[in-house]
Amino acid sequence: MPEVAIEAAATVAVTASGRRMSPRQWAAHRPASIAARFALAACAFVYPLALLPAHAASNKVRISSLSDVTFGTLASLSIDAISSQSVCLFSDTLASRYTVTAIGNGPGGAFALTSGLASMPFEVEWSGTPGQASGAQLFPNVPLSGQVSSATQQSCNNGPATSASLIVVLRSAALSSATAGTYSGTLTLLVAAE
Amino acid sequence: MQTSRLSRLSLACAAAMLHSAAFAATQGTLGSTSTGSLSISASVPSRVQLSGLTDVSFVNQDPATAALNAQNVCVWSNTSTRGYNVTASGSGAGNAFTLANGAALVPYSVEWAASSGQSSGTALTAGTALAGLTSTATNATCASGPSSTSSLIVKISTASLQTMQASTSYTGTLTLVVAPE
């Protein structure tokens, strides 16, 4: 678009005289013409920038306010153990959209907790709104797309304090199949602009 | 001065260690992608479950023949060895294994085997745990894997049967407590 504006102005300058310039005349006018071209080019570059909103999307994202999940000693193995936390997900894209990918520390990124050689699977869910006890199930290394953030500040220091929910679930089937012990693992969340 | 510096350094190190221990979660930074991580921990306590029990009825029992009832039950243990112990208690005085009809009492015996399909096992003493048992159950109620894991055997000797009055019902309750090992 800026280049079109420059050519249009140049054409007007030529046709405004209504006649062709001699080489001498051209030489006399050339410095001004070049200066005009620079000026027009500068304007053409600056003008669109001036029209841009103050907070243009930069396609950057940030996940923060994550907390460790500690289930403690599970009193009952016959019911699901669920831990939900509200986190800050900021997306500076035009539609505040993002994708989230979860990776566990089991083989191939599997969601698994370990206690020595014993292993216990867990599930991960994600919701694009905070305060949720359930959400869309995440699968290891598979991005969940179409998420929209309500955060207005990268660390949720103002605006909504949180913008998404992370839910970790230990199914009763897994609990009742697990050998007694203390299990631990890590969960990594990769967020990308969309 | 040297001591003060060392103290401050120690405090700083301690604080850093405490901080890292208490806040293991890492937060993402602003960028085209952002990565955060957190730890997950859970403790699964030692648990056992006894299921598949059925009432025992001896009907029109011939006093000349010892009465025997064996049933397959499910014992599940989630310890690393799948170990458990079992304690039986009767409804008689001092948890004795007795059936009663009013004041008339008839003793019976209880045996346990850590495998199913058995008609004899280790004799249980009322209120005393039989230890060192191992379960093969892979599901808490044996809904999958082996359908039963153990045998409970109840017996009434001919001597006891012959003390019973004909056409009279004797009843009692047997309680089994299983604990993880």
Image (cartoon, coloured by chain):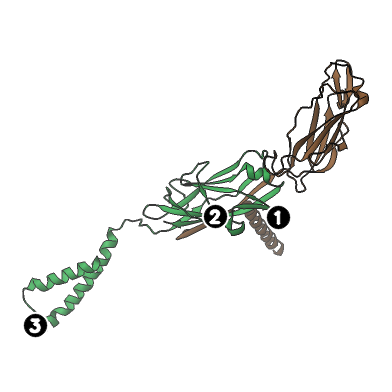
Chain colours: A green, B brown
| Secondary element at image label 3 | loop
Residue nearer the viewer, B64 or B123:
B64
Mark 2 or 1, nearer chain start: 1
Is residue B61 shown left or right of residue A168?
A: right
Give x and y (percent) for residue B42.
66, 47
Residue nearer the viewer, A11 or B133:
B133
Question: How busy is the neighbourhood of tag 3: few (under 14 within 10 Å), some, or many (20 plus)?
Answer: few
The quarter of the displayed image where residue A71 is located: top right
- Closer to viewer: mark 2 or mark 3: 2
- Judging by the rendered image, the residue that carries numbered circle 3 is A22
Residue nearer the viewer, B121 or B88:
B121
Residue type at numbered disc 1? Leu
Mark 1 or 3, nearer chain start: 3
Please tell me if label 2 and label 3 are on a single chain: yes
Residue type at numbered disc 3? Ser
As displayed, is residue B17 above or below residue A171? Answer: below
Chain letter of disc 1? A
Give x and y (percent) for residue B90.
84, 27
- Judging by the rendered image, the residue that carries numbered circle 2 is A140
Q: Report, in whole angstroms, how far the alpha carbon at label 2 lies from the one at label 3.
A: 73 Å
Question: How busy is the neighbourhood of tag 2: few (under 14 within 10 Å), some, or many (20 plus)?
Answer: some
Q: Check residue A117 in the rendering and tell me which mark sits there, or answer none.
A: 1
| Secondary element at image label 1 | loop
